[in-house]
Amino acid sequence: MTPSPWLPVPEALARVLASAPVPLSTETLPLARCAGRTLARDLAARRTQPPFPASAMDGYAARAADIATVPATLKQIGTSAAGHGFSGAVGPGECVRIFTGAPVPAGADVVVIQEDTKFEGDLVTALQSDAAGRNVRKAGLDFTEGDVLLRAGRRLGPCELALAAAMNHGTLAVTRRPRVAMLATGDELVQPGQTPGPDQIVASNTFAVMAFAEAAGADIIDLGIAADTFAALEGSIRAARDAKADVLVTLGGASVGDHDLVQTALTREGMELGFWKIAMRPGKPLMHGRLGDMRILGLPGNPVSAIVCGVLFLVPLVRALSGDPAAGRDPSEPAILGVDLKANDSRQDYLRASLARGNDGLPVATPFGRQDSSMLRVLAQSECLVIREAHAPQAKAGDPCRIVRL
């Protein structure tokens, strides 16, 4: 078995993540603007929730001792509603009309739901005997003041924002969004909606890679398309630096052809090359480096190669810069192969595949027959990537495999 001359995928990812040793700076934002952001500091509750014993149902707050034997007739002495509690106390033979979320008045220890009562005037008859505590939410049932409920590094989704609000936080300290500059390169490219010349194609890679990066938490700086000249490329690189980009992503132009000038242009601007070429398919000519404070990620020009590399390398980098402690966690999950596969060579494969429900609970992944790295139609039909390790032996339909969902 001849070892690959190129960098293995795990080592390449480790080097990319090592370029983000600490999260970016923090900023304090109103709670309503924190969706999708990463919490920069642990968050402790500023209040107890609920702050008082509260009713879990509509009904009547009473003393359990008074309804131990039913039917039991009680006198209603008041009402407790959410935001308008009953200020008195419930004594023997008494009850208070109560609504969901309202404070349970002093003296009462049970709420009889209204379906288990009948009433006439101010007399209420309990038809069901309930033990003390029934339908009563204790103070602090959810959390207590001082409890640390959200840790630094937590991605703030809808449920986390609701919890932070209930904890009485109107603003949150979050990691600022990484600024990711995107630069497509090549004389052959025109923007979507334009009319390509006879030797041109429509740029497409940028839009998928931008979308993945933005979903991971990045602010995007779109530098457009740079022509295949050193002047155009170096001007765009300087524009990325002027915009204080944390990451510059180039698409295309990083191979070895006469018109592949990106690596040279970056080197002329001062880039320290980290690595170039990795043992994966699609995506071998991946480039990584550093230009001052700006990380460089050079993606291949083929659409599928660029997008797969964006998923596997750019997304974890954005999350690491955002302070996500799980940025480098293996994103793969187990599945079952739907077709036979030949033995693999020295490059780790990522096969575009469909997914179906399996009989044993694991999804069945079926790679498409054609895996050309220029075919966006196949990629758009794919639900996952089937990972084939370097030098993996022949596999049969029904064998276990690992996938990365798209």
Image: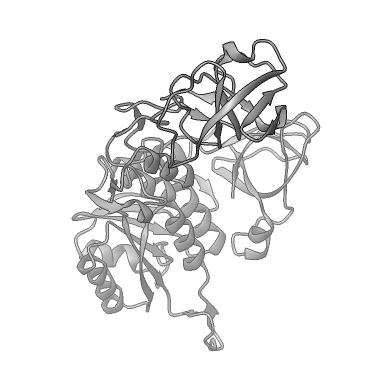
Percent position of residue 124, x then y: 65, 28
Give the camera-side residue of 61 and 267. 61
Which residue reaches farthest front? 121
Indicate left or right for 159 with 321 as reference: right
Residue 135 locus on image (x, y percent): 58, 25
- So how many labels did they put on this image? 0
24 left or right of 224? left
Instruction: Report the residue at 30% width, 78% height from top.
Output: 232
Residue 224 on image: x %, y %: 39, 75
Looking at the rendered image, the quarter that the N terminus falls into is: top right
Is the residue 331 above or below the residue 353 in the image?
above
Residue 243's quadrant in the figure?
bottom left
Q: Is residue 2 above or below residue 72?
A: below
> Residue at the location (35% across, 45% down)?
38
Q: Which residue lies furthest to the right in this view?
A: 359
Closer to us: 323 or 384:
323
Residue 5 in view in this figure: no
Evaluate whether residue 50 shows in this view. yes
Residue 255 is situated, as x and y percent measured from the top left of the image, at 42, 62
**Left or right of 277 in this view: 236:** left
Looking at the picture, tell me which residue is in the foreground, 297 or 210. Answer: 210
Where 264 sits versus 79, above or below? below
Q: Which of 406 and 187 is in front in this view?
A: 406
Coloring scheme of the render? one colour
- Which of the 4 image quadrants contains residue 378? bottom right
